[in-house]
Image (cartoon, grey):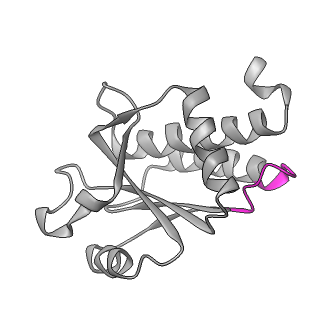
């Protein structure tokens, strides 16, 4: 399964970008986790609207303070299930600081919450990227999770 983290807003925090790149590179080196590709990209509001309209063979998950809470094990089970369902691509959408526009009609999509705490968008990218990497290591019994 291909995973993309799509971010509205800027991706200009060097330290956070470096951490994301580290986990991205580590993910590329893991074999047999079921995650075949991992990308973090900026997306415009217009591109997001088009994505939502043409959602074929994609799982779209919005990050929201009102979304479903996960611990690492339940998040890992969720990713395993998406892989087992042969979902080709999963998109995690991180909105702007003020949230998502009401006109996006995101009610038909799943929402998850990283924490009850509030994070900057750049830090949310790092946390989500690390958790995706952690789940991949759990799926292949790599010792990273147990460290």
**86 sits left or right of 29 in the view:** left
Q: Can residue 107 be seen in this view?
A: yes
Q: Nearer the viewer, residue 8 or 48?
A: 48
Asked if 10 appears above or below 71 in the picture, the reply is below
Q: Is residue 131 visible?
A: no
Quadrant of image for the C terminus: top right
Q: Main secondary structure of the magenta part?
A: loop
Q: Which of 115 and 74 is in front in this view?
A: 74
Residue 7 coordinates in the image, percent (x, y) = 39, 60
Residue range of the region highlighted in magenta in the rendering: 28-37
Asked if 91 appears above or below 14 in the picture, the reply is below
Asked if 91 appears above or below 146 in the picture, the reply is below
Q: Residue at x 20, y 68 (%)?
A: 104
**132 sits left or right of 110 in the view:** right
**101 sits left or right of 131 in the view:** left
Residue 11 coordinates in the image, percent (x, y) = 42, 58
Quadrant of image for the N terminus: bottom right
Q: How many labels does the image show?
A: 0
Q: Nearer the viewer, residue 108 or 116?
A: 108
Residue 47 coordinates in the image, percent (x, y) = 34, 79
Q: Which residue is drawn at 69% across and 46% down?
A: 22
Q: Residue at x 33, y 39 (%)?
A: 120
**90 sits left or right of 35 in the view:** left
Q: Is residue 117 magenta?
A: no
Q: Residue 141's quadrant in the figure?
A: top right
Q: Which residue in the rendered view is the most extreme toward the top? A: 147
């Amino acid at each position: 399964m291909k995973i993309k983290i799509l971010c509205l807003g800027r991706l200009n925090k060097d330290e956070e970008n470096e951490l994301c790149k580290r986990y991205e590179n580590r993910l590329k080196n893991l074999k047999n986790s079921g995650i075949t590709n991992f990308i973090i990209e900026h997306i415009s509001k217009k591109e997001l609207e088009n994505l939502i309209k043409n959602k074929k063979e994609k799982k779209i998950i919005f990050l929201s303070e009102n979304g479903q809470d996960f611990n690492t094990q339940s998040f890992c089970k969720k990713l395993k299930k998406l892989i087992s369902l042969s979902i080709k691509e999963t998109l995690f959408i991180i909105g702007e600081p003020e949230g998502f526009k009401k006109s996006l009609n995101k009610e038909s999509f799943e929402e998850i919450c990283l924490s009850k705490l509030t994070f900057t968008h750049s830090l949310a990218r790092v946390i989500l990227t690390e958790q995706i990497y952690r789940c991949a290591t759990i799926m292949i019994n790599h010792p990273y999770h147990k460290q």
